[in-house]
Amino acid sequence: MIFASFLPALAGGSVASQTSSLWLQNYDATGHWWLSALVAAVPLLLLIVLLLAFGMKAHRAALLALLTAFVLAISVFHMPAKLAVLAALHGAAYGLFPIFWIIFPVIFMYELTVRAGRFALLQQCLTHVTQDSRLQLLLIAFAFGAFFEGAAGFGTPVAVCGTLLIGAGFPPIEAAAYALLANTAPVAFGALGTPVIALHGVTGIDTGVLSHLISALLTPFCILVPFWLIAAFAGFRAMTAVWPAIIVSGVTFGFTQLAVATFHGPWLVDIAASIVSIAALLLLLRFWKPRQILGTALQDLTLASDHTCTPSRQDIFRAV
């Protein structure tokens, strides 16, 4: 919300031009671009310091950062106070509609599935598809995380998929780190395409054009990120041992993302791409598995008893 509130103050051309014809935004208010950029970043840096270094509660840190942004917008960038207030209200409204109304139903459904026991069933369905931790990362952190990024975004993939990875045996900090790493591929179209829609609002460029260009730029990275994810977890040699699964998950996700973004728009890109990627990966695992099975501590489980199970259609339907 703070960033959304501060953005119109810095890139206030669209807000200011519609509200006042007398004020034009000066992006280099200090006469030195690096100093202007540093001043513009102060509210965000303050928010991070207050949260991480001082452990301040989020709402208090956000209010202080908002106040700082308000003061800097008026004093340094010479934004009229009326426009600064309107920009702050616009940011607050954008935080509530549609961002809040995207996240709230997802969190509600998550809590409902937990209380109803469906989340544990979903966790069982996902983690018991394979014993290999590398494939679990592809399935949960990359593919399933992309689904939550497309449906809700704003940290939801890390929270949900991190929990699933912890249940699979990954240490908590590592689980969060891998979920964050995997989330670099789908984040541009997160929360039903909110970043692209926000970019359209600032630039005025058609959402279809933006979606196509962004997806074209991201397609190679959608293929590279799964390689990076597994290499960060298990190393290069262990990564090459599961390259068929990495290729299948990355290629299906990347090209589905490109197709949906080009022919439909930004809204369902991650959701459609993740579903196709999950289906392709599950289909591959029915006919292929790596020669060596690695656990979450990179221990060799090849000769261990196979405790994996194939969930019934009824279980999968209940979990979904």
Image: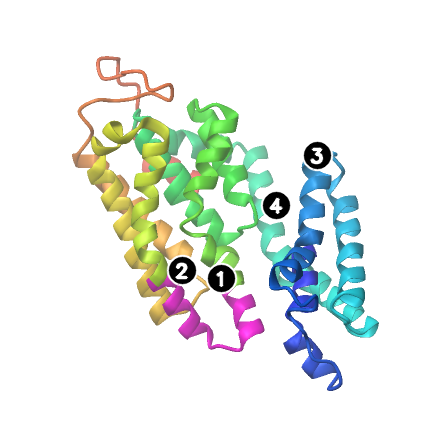
The residue drawn where x is 34% and y is 71% is 263
Magenta highlight range: 196-216
Screen quadrant of the C terminus:
top left
Name the amino acid, label 4.
Phe
Residue 32 x/y as whole percent: 64, 64
Residue 246 x/y as whole percent: 26, 41
Q: Which residue is mark 3?
A: 53
- Mark 1 or 3, which is nearer the eye? 3
Residue 21 x/y as whole percent: 73, 86
Q: Earlier in the sequence, mark 1 or mark 2?
A: 1
The magenta stretch spans residue 280: no
282 or 215: which is nearer to us?
A: 215
Q: Which residue is mark 2?
A: 269
Residue closest to the far front:
31
Q: Earlier in the sequence, mark 4 or mark 3?
A: 3
Q: Earlier in the sequence, mark 1 or mark 3?
A: 3
Q: Does residue 297 appear left or right of residue 172 in this picture?
A: left
Q: Quadrant of residue 113?
A: top right
Distance from Cα at disc 1 to Cα at disc 3: 32 Å
Q: Which residue is mark 4?
A: 108
Q: Earlier in the sequence, mark 1 or mark 4?
A: 4
Q: Which residue is mark 1?
A: 193
